[in-house]
Amino acid sequence: MTPRIVPTRIGYGGDYNPEQWPREIWDDDYAAFKLAGIDTVTVGVFAWAHLEPAEHAYDFSTLDAIVARAADEGMRIVLATPSGAMPPWLARKYPDACRVDFEGRRHVYGQRHNACPSSSDFRRAAVALAKRLARRYGDNPSVVAWHIGNEFGGACWCSNCADAFRGWLRERYGSLDRLNDAWNTTFWSHTFTEWTQIEPPNALSEHWRGPDHTAFQGITLDYKRFMSDQLLQGFLAEKAAVREHSPDVPVTTNMMGLYQPVDYHRWAPHLDFASWDNYPPEDRSSTRTAARMALAHRLMRGLRDGEPFWVMEQTPSVTASRDVNPVKRPGVLRLWSWQSVANGADAVLYFQLRQSRGACEKYHGAVLDHAGRTDTRLFREVAELGDEFARVGDALLGGRTPARAALLVDWDSWWAVEMSDGPNRNVRYLDVLTAYHRALWQANVPLDVVPVTADLSGYDVVVAPLLHMVKGDLADRVTALVERGGAFVTTALSGRVDEDDNAFPADVPGPFASLLGLRVEETDAQQPDVANPVTLFGVEYDARHVFEVVVPDDAEVLGAYGADFYAGTPAVTRAARGRGHAWYVATLLDDDGVAAVVRAALAEHGLIGPLGDVPDVEVTERVTPDGTRYLFVLNHGEARTVPAPVAGTDLLSGRGFGAGDELDLAPTAVLVLRCA
């Protein structure tokens, strides 16, 4: 039975590194934590050099004191294995633990995320330390979760990885004949006759313009799959070592949301709960940033079939990793934290609790600055949020979002469409995905973000932009969705290739052609500054990058191109199938055009959510295990007055509302309505 965390309130706290500070400061820290309502600390993330200063020479005295003090203070402890950054002695003694980069250079010690995932020396040392940690602290009742490594990612192209890749390929394909067929190696006389002939695709082999620009997409796609799996094997090895001595404490690792190199769907079955680090690309209060964060939250929630997740890290104020690092404006910390809870988080943690004095994160935001002050605006906001979480207690815990719409995300399509040699290298999967999600988010439709393997039977509308690769029985499941009355929306460049990244020997869009009632005869591509107008529902929108010339069979034409030799031909279609409809957008529309398509598909099913016509106001729902409904209203824009979407009581203010009553929303306002 998979263990579960049973907290009594929303977890609140973050990364704490007291080994970086003299012990007399710990007293001040915990006094401040108490003021802020912090109840959870993550410790040991980067402590390897302290715990094992030389091979097999372990020293747990500092960590013993850290754990004992946290337990004495009543803290819930998330205990990390420190494999996210190896110590200098390991790299010096075992050079193969250091990664080889895409250009074939063996790195020397430095930075972090610097270990080769195929190094047996690194893995042996990491597992041995994880086992000792679990043996020492695994039965401590204050330890509520294990945090394996840190932000798994990166890649290596060394000889150990080459050997492991060949083994991975043997297991995947079974024979060279099957592999040669999958990679279409008759092209350019690349047929392999021995496994040892296969080299990792790097700057010296199949590539000439970077890791994603390859002459042979099959081998590069498989290397991405392999590297994601190889990183996973490291996680699993440490998890098994922890499980041996701590069988009842759940295990996770902090993911990075919309992170291309690691296929989190392949990792999901091995997590006891999902967690991730929320550092959006735009650190300001804006609709685009809020929508992108909601997408990542929902992706994390979807990893384990809708279970609550944790925000393992967020900055309370600024990051330090970008060229420009603006501070979060007043109220934004609270708004974004409640947004994570609204979308399924049961814990909201910070990086970090006390600011580091040196190195690259000395200016990264923290709950306590270098002076340890508790009279700053930032600390007051942290403490006010902690007080709200304490007052809400366990009311929201375990809540799920009942959704009738789904957005499909597929790492294989993400990889494949961006490494394709044509039609347009300017197409970015994440840009298109976020545009379609933003339209769904602005419509306030209860939404799941799920893998292409998910059960679609509970949804009325499924949106799948850039579904380039079609695997398994996906086409059959989508057809069943439409025929029973649902809507399916997909876009240009979908239905192009099979799981080996080989084109279907059929009309584009391959397995979806019959469902969509059309074929794509040609695909035009243009520079990013070239737009083709598309008239849709009587309104003109811009389209860019790719323009498919569609020949409809029995699909209804809803929108047409306005320029070039294909002017007047279909750009947006809808095909009736059974009791439902299959929509096809044969180009990449601008945001308003995407919204027009998405809202039309949702409206047919009555799925425009409450306040779905009010810009910048996010409304989402969680239903707790006892059936209680909570509706979150979050204002990401300017001050406004809106009607209460339901009758209920705001958990934060205690104020009651009737359905339709006026709600005066200040900028960054948050309401958590317990539905009557």
Image: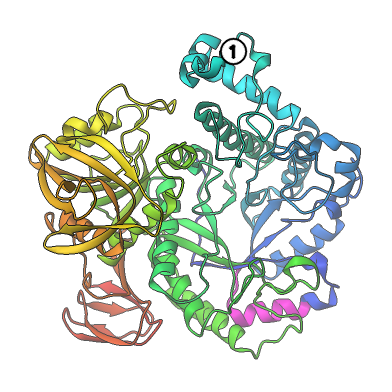
The residue positioned 91% from the left and 38% from the top of the image is 93
The quadrant in which the C terminus is found is bottom left
Q: Amino acid at mark 1?
A: Phe
- What residue does disc 1 label? 192
Work out whether 316 lies above or below 554: below
Residue 496 appears in the rendering? yes
Q: Position of residue 315 (x, y in %)?
A: 59, 70
Secondary structure, magenta segment, majority class: helix
Choose between 350 and 601: the one closer to the eye: 601
Left or right of 646, for residue 438: right
The residue positioned 37% from the left and 52% from the top of the image is 433
Residue range in magenta is 27-39
Left or right of 231, for residue 291: left
The residue positioned 58% from the left and 37% from the top of the image is 228
Choose between 154 and 24: the one closer to the eye: 154
Choose between 471 and 491: the one closer to the eye: 491
Q: Quadrant of residue 97?
A: top right
Q: Quadrant of residue 44?
A: bottom right
Q: Position of residue 374 (x, y in %)?
A: 67, 87
Q: Is residue 515 magenta?
A: no
Q: Is residue 28 magenta?
A: yes
Total marks in image: 1
Disc 1, SS:
loop
The residue positioned 30% from the left and 27% from the top of the image is 473
